[in-house]
Amino acid sequence: MKSSLLFVEPPRNFWFVMGEYLPPPSSLLILAAYVERELPGVDIDIVDCQADRLDWKGLERYIESTDPSIVLTSGFTTNAYTCARTCEIVKTVSQDIVTIVGGIHFSFTTEESLRNYPEIDYIVRGEGEQTVVDLIKTLQNKGKISDVEGISYRKNNTIVHTPARPLIENLDMLPYPAYHLVEKNLKRYHFTMMAGRNTRYMILEGARGCEHQCSFCTQWNYWGSRWRTKSAKRIADEIEFLHNTYGGVFLWLADDHMGLSSRGKQLYEELRQKQCKDDIMLFFQARIDDIAQHPDLIGNLREVGTYWILCGVETDSQEILIEYKKGIKTQDAYQAMKIMKQKDIFSQAMFVIGARRDTHESIERLREYSNELTPDIAIYTALTPFPGTIYYETAKKNGWIEDTNYSNYDMAHAIMPTDTLTRKEVQEELWRCYKTFYGSVTKNIAGVISNNKLKRTLYRHMAGQFVVEKLRRLI
């Protein structure tokens, strides 16, 4: 039986804190590339409702016109309902179309999701490439579904979880993301706040997972508490391929952390041999302790196209850092910001408010701390109990979660109170954080006329998107 597989990036709202942007559906592109290579007899299509400008009715018409035998979608917690609605629309078109969902949220909410969303046929848990290929082959051959590792599904009104599938050991064996399947939309993908409206924006993956176990993070748990990396050569080759083949300029290396001590030097050595290093703008995440320990590497990576680094500073409280299991010290943040400023790297610092011991006074100290650090951009988030995190289990057990609407799990909505602050007060404090950092007329003028192009672009965009005002409306 010949199969046709449709990957769907559903209609959804993007995180307004980061302004107006449109990312490529990178998770689907990575998965589609593997399926395309391993199952050449399967017809593969990707519909990106944002780039293709399709609403829900438009998606329904698209599914009707393409008549796929299998539809696959995935999303984060805040987009869980859009994935479920996609499957609902699929079943409206035809009950015979098989629906598959995957990703972090559904991997950690299999029982809940299969119970609440009868339109979902299969959930792929964890790493998807080999599982999806195995599942499609089994469906094609009418084989025994229970033999497919890494899936959950319903059978005779019970929910079945097959054994977990082992992780892929050699990530270099994965093909490049299937950007050719969305080539018509490449000119539409952009990250205006970061690189401007007309800079071609692409995402690539250099590693999976994290060996650290932060209590509010899903990633380490999802990937088995391990950090697996592609070789530095493979990463550099993929960067070169995306630039030379598709004109990618602003390239987001979407790893949970860069792993400077493990591969920073090797990546620098590989990239310095590439001509594209003079044309690209690399953006990646790094731990502040890693940056503090490797100032020379930061300078080297700046030479080969690194313009922007995001780091999780989180808080000025060492006690809360211990609660978050971050394994960093507040002094690391000062050193990291100083190094990035010296090496002409645009610094993005992430902060979290809403820990149980947070008070009006502690959050005020955090605001002062974030201003003292002088990052080029500060992003403040509300502590969010994502399913799959240590914090979720603790919060659920203690009855701290007051908002169970997953659409609000975007880190801009306060989901829980603290010991002394109501949920509304946490929301007010989040707004004050942005107002303090971005509300200064002097700072905004300096940002808008800055000699640094990235900083100029950022401050003009933040002003134009009225981010501070949008946060105020959430109170």
Image (cartoon, rainbow, N blue to C red):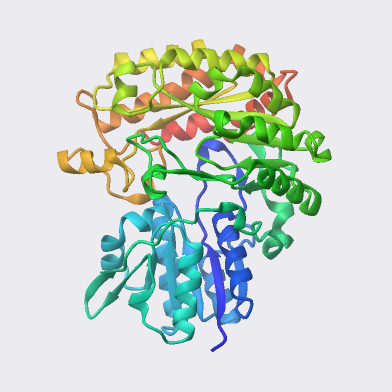
Q: Position of residue 159 (x, y in %)?
A: 25, 70
Looking at the figure, which quarter contains the N terminus?
Answer: bottom right
Residue ranking furthest to the bottom: 1
**Left or right relative to 344: residue 255:** left
Q: Position of residue 301 (x, y in %)?
A: 69, 28
The residue positioned 40% from the left and 34% from the top of the image is 212
Residue 266 quadrant: top right
Q: Is residue 94 above or below residue 385?
A: below
Q: Is residue 277 above or below residue 173?
A: above
Q: Nearer the viewer, residue 58 or 40?
A: 40
Residue ranking furthest to the right: 275
Q: Is residue 467 above or below residue 4?
A: above
**Left or right relative to 145: residue 58:** right
The residue positioned 56% from the left and 16% from the top of the image is 337
Q: Is residue 339 something that shows in the picture? A: yes
Q: Is residue 97 something that shows in the picture? A: no
Q: Position of residue 460 (x, y in %)?
A: 66, 28
Looking at the figure, which quarter contains the C terminus?
Answer: top left
Q: Position of residue 329 (x, y in %)?
A: 41, 17
Q: How many marks?
A: 0
Q: Nearer the viewer, residue 196 or 169?
A: 169
Q: Is residue 286 above or below residue 177?
A: above
Residue 59 quadrant: bottom right
